[in-house]
Amino acid sequence: MRRRINMTVGLLLVSMLFVLMLVSLFYTPYEPNAMRIADRLSGPSASHWLGTDNFGRDLLSRSMVGTQTAFLVGAASVAIGAAGGLLVGSLAGYAGKWADELLMRATDALLAFPGILLALLLVSVFRPSLLQTILAIGILFVPSFARVVRSGVLQQREADYVRAVRAFGAGHVNVLFVQILPNIASSIITTAALSFSTAILIEAALSYLGLGVQPPDPSWGRMLNESQTYLSAAPWFTLAPGVLITISVLGFNLLSDGIRDARDVRA
Amino acid sequence: MVGAKPSGGETVLEVRDLRLELSAKDGARLPVLEEVSLKVGRGEIVGIVGESGCGKSVLSLSVLGLLPPSIRVAGGGIYNGERKELHRLGEKSLQRIRGKEIAMIFQDPMTSLNPGMTVGKQVAEAIRLHTGASKREAEEKTVGLFRKVGLPRPETLYHEYPHRLSGGMRQRVMIAMAVSCQPDLLIADEPTTALDVTIQAQILKLMKTLREEDGTSILLISHDLGLISGVCDRIAVMYAGRIVEEGAAAEVLRHPAHPYTAGLLASLALPSKKGTRLHSIPGSVPALRERGPGCAFASRCPYAADRCLAEKPALRGVAGSAFPRSAACHLLGEEGGLANVGS
Amino acid sequence: MSAPEAILELHHIEKSYAPKRWLSRGETLRAVDGVSLSVRKGETLGIVGESGCGKSTIGQIASLMLRPTGGSVVFKGEELVPGRRSPRDSRRSRIQYVFQDPYSSLNPRFTIGRLLEEPLAIRKKGTRRERRREVLRMLSRIGLDPAYADRYPHELSGGQRQRVGIARALMPSPELLVLDEPVSALDVSVQAQILNLLKDLQAERSLTYLFISHDLNVVHYMSDRVAVMYLGRIVELAEVGELYDGPLHPYTRALVDAIPDEPGTTPREAEIIEGELPDPRQLAGGCAFRARCPFAHERCGRQPLLEEVKPGHYVACHLLEPDRD
C-alpha cells in the first residue's frame, strides 16, 4: 500500500515538472529574458502569476525554462554516470581479482571527496558552463553506479542460473548482458532516479555559487542567488525556484523508492 | 466426536476447531487452517505430517501466539493443560508460557541462536529469565543440560559461539534451551530437516529419551513420513489446511484410511519399491485461493466422486481399529468402515 | 578400474581450496581428495554422503563446470579439460547437469520457452522456428502443457520447475546427466513424479545418470551402483543391493542404520553412530572416519586405499584388507 503511494506521488510530481518543461519548449507567458524595468519586483498578479524579478522578468517564464536546464543536467549527467558506472562496475564485478581491486580503489578515492567539492574542483579547472556542469556531475555519479553494478554482478555471477547457462557454453558477453544486467536493472534504475534529484540539487548549488549555468540561461540555482538580496522585499522571488527544486528532489526520491519497491516483489 | 483420547489421560494441549485466516493484500480473507482439532496427552509424542503449504507450521506457531500479523485466529481455540485459552492471552501472559510451559525448536538452529553470544550464556540467560536463578546456578544447570542432551565436553562448549558448532550440536543446544525449564510440551518444527542422516537419527533418539526421562510431551512437525513414523505415538496428516487423518502412528501408516495418506505412503521411494514404478499423486497442492467448496484433495484423488467436489468431508471416527482413529473422507461411508485404499 | 563400457571416467580427481586471503593464514581445504570413478554406459551411479563430503563437487567436475586441481576427466575415451567449455565443442554438451534448486537455476526474467531454447541458441543450432518446435516438443514430453512456454518460472510449482530444469538439460541431447539432489527441494508426492519421469527418460533416451543425493532411500531406488563418500573420498562402492544389504565400511553401516524404518513395519533395533563430521581442515592424515569409528585401530592412522574386496565391491578400510589379519 505504502509503496503505491510513493510511486504515485513521485510519478505525479515528476510528470508535472516534465509537462511544464515540454510546454516551456513551445510557450512561455513572456520571453524569459525580456526585461521591463517598470515591472521590476512586482508581486504575483494576474499578469505575472509568480511575480517578477529585479529586472522585471517574468518569474513563471523563467522558472519554466529553468525546468529545461534541470532536466537536461539531470538526464545528461545520469546518463554519463550510468554509462561510466556500468562499464567500471561490470568490469570490476565480472573480471574480479586485480581489475576489481584497481577499479574499486579508484572509485573509493573518488567517493572520498565530498560531492559538491569535487564538482567545484572540476568546474573551476575548466570554464564554468552548462557542459562542464553536466560533465562534472556525471563523473561524480560514476562511483555510486559502479558500486551498485559491481555488487549486483558479483551477486548474480555465482547464481545457479548463471552457472547453468555457462554450463551450456554461453560466452561472457551473453552472460553479462543477457543474463546478469537485466536482473540488476531495477537497482540501476533506482540509483538513476535518486541521482537525478541529486543532479538537480548540485546544479542548483553550483549555479547559486555562480559556477554552473551562466547568464542569461535561466537556472533555478541562479535565480535563488539573484533573489537573496531581495529576500525581505520580494519573498516570491525566492519562493518560485525554491519550491520547484523541492518538488523535483522530492518527486525523484519518491519515484526512486517506488521503483525499488515495485521491482522487489517477486510472487 | 473429533480427535482421539490422549493415551495418558492428562492433556497438555488441546486445539479445538481452530480456524486461521490470512488477510491477503487485496483484502480477501483466506482460510489457512480449518476445523483443526488436536490433543496432546502428557508424555505423548504426536506427529503432524504434511507437505509444504498444508498449514502444519502455522499451527505450531499459533500455539505459541507467534502468528505473523497477517494471520489471525478466526474460530475455535487453543487450550493448555489448565484449560487456559492460549489464543486469548495477551503478549505478557504468553511470554510467561513460552519456554516455561511450551517450548519450541525450529528447523534451522543457526538462525535461532544469537551469533554474538556464547551458547552457554544464551541457555543460562534463558534459565535465569524464567526461574530467577543466580548466575552460578544457571551456569551449573546449563552444563548439566548440555551433558543431558549429549553435547561433548560441556564445560568447554559453554564458552563457544554458535558458528563454531556443527548443525547437530547447535540443534542440541536449542533442545537444551528448550527443555531448560522442563516444559510440558516441546514443539519441534522440522528439527532434523537441515541435518545429516546420521545426525538426524541421533536427534530423534534424544527426543525419545527426553520423553522417557522427563515425561515431556512432544509435538513433532515434519514433511517426512518415514522419519517420524518411528518416533511418534500418534500422527495427524494434514492437507490444505485440514487434518485429513489422525490416529495411532502404526495403524495410520499400515492401513491408511484417507486416499491422501495412502498416496503419500505409496509415493515414498522406499527400498521395498526398488524396480517398481512409484505411485505418484498427480498435480500439486491447491493454492489458498484455489480451494473450492469440496474436499481439497478431490482434484488429485483417484477415487473422487461428485460428492467430493461439492461437499467438504468432516473428520469422523474410523471403525475397526484398536485405537481411536479418524479420517475426513466421503469414501469412509456412514458406518466408518476402512476404505482400503492404497498399499 | 576402468571397465570397457565406461562412458565417463574420473581419474584421481582432487579439488582443494587455498585459503582465501593472502594475509590470513589458513589450511587448504581438500573438498575432493583423489577420487576415481568410472560410470558405465546406461547405468545410474548413485553418490551418497553427508553435507561436505564432496559429492556435489564431484558432480560439478564431472559435468565440467568446475576445474579440478588435479586428475582428469575422460569422456568416451577422450580427455576433456574441465572448466573450459568452448561453445563450439559439441562433445561437452554430451554431459549435462541438473541443479538441486530449480528456482535459482532458472533466470527469473526469462520465459520457460526462452530458457529451454537457450542451450540451442547459444550453440546456434537450427533456426528460431526449429528451436521453438523443439522446445514445444520437449515441454509436452516432460508433461507440461505447451502453453507454459510463455510463462515465467515463478508461475510454476516446484515440481513443474524441476521438470523444466530437466528438460533444459536434455535440450542439447546429452548422453550423461549429472543429477545433483534433483528431488531434495520437492515435496514427497512431487518427488515420486520426478523420479518416475527420470526413469522414463533414461529408458527412452538410453541416458546414463550420475545421481547425487543425501537421501539414502532415493539413491537406493534410482541407482544400479552406489558410491559412498566421506570427507572427500570414496569409502565404499558396490552394486546397490549388495551395498545396502551388506555394507562393509563402518561408515556405510552407520548410514544404512540411520535410514528410518519403513512406515508401518516393526522397528529395527539399529545402532546409532555417535559423534559428528570432523572439520576436514583439522584431519592429520589417516582414515577420516577414525574419530567416529567404533573399530578404529592404530593402523587407521594411515590412509586406507579403495580396494576390491569382492568382485565389483570396493571398500577403503583397513578392517577389510585381505592380506592383513
Image: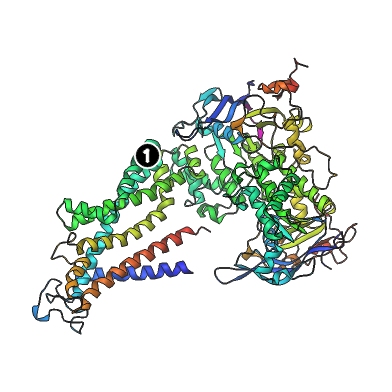
- Image-based side of C288 in relation to C70, left or right: right
Q: Residue at x 52, y 43 (%)?
A: A160
Q: Chain of mark 1?
A: A
In the image, residue C269 lies at what x, y percent? 84, 40
Most foreground residue, B46 or A112: A112
Vertical position of residue A45 compared to residue C137: above or below: below
Most foreground residue, C114 or B43: B43
- Image-based side of B69 in relation to A169, left or right: right
Vertical position of residue C151 compared to residue A178: above or below: below
Magenta stretch?
Answer: C38-49
| Label 1 environment density (alpha carbons within 10 Å; few <14, some 14–19, many ≥20) | few
Q: Residue at x 16, y 81 (%)?
A: A42
The residue wearing badge 1 is A101
**Is residue C46 located in the magenta-colored stretch of the structure?**
yes
Residue at the bottom extreme, as displayed = A46
Is residue C263 in view from this perspective?
A: yes
**Is residue B268 located in the magenta-colored stretch of the structure?**
no
Q: Quadrant of residue B147?
A: top right
Most foreground residue, C112 or A230: A230
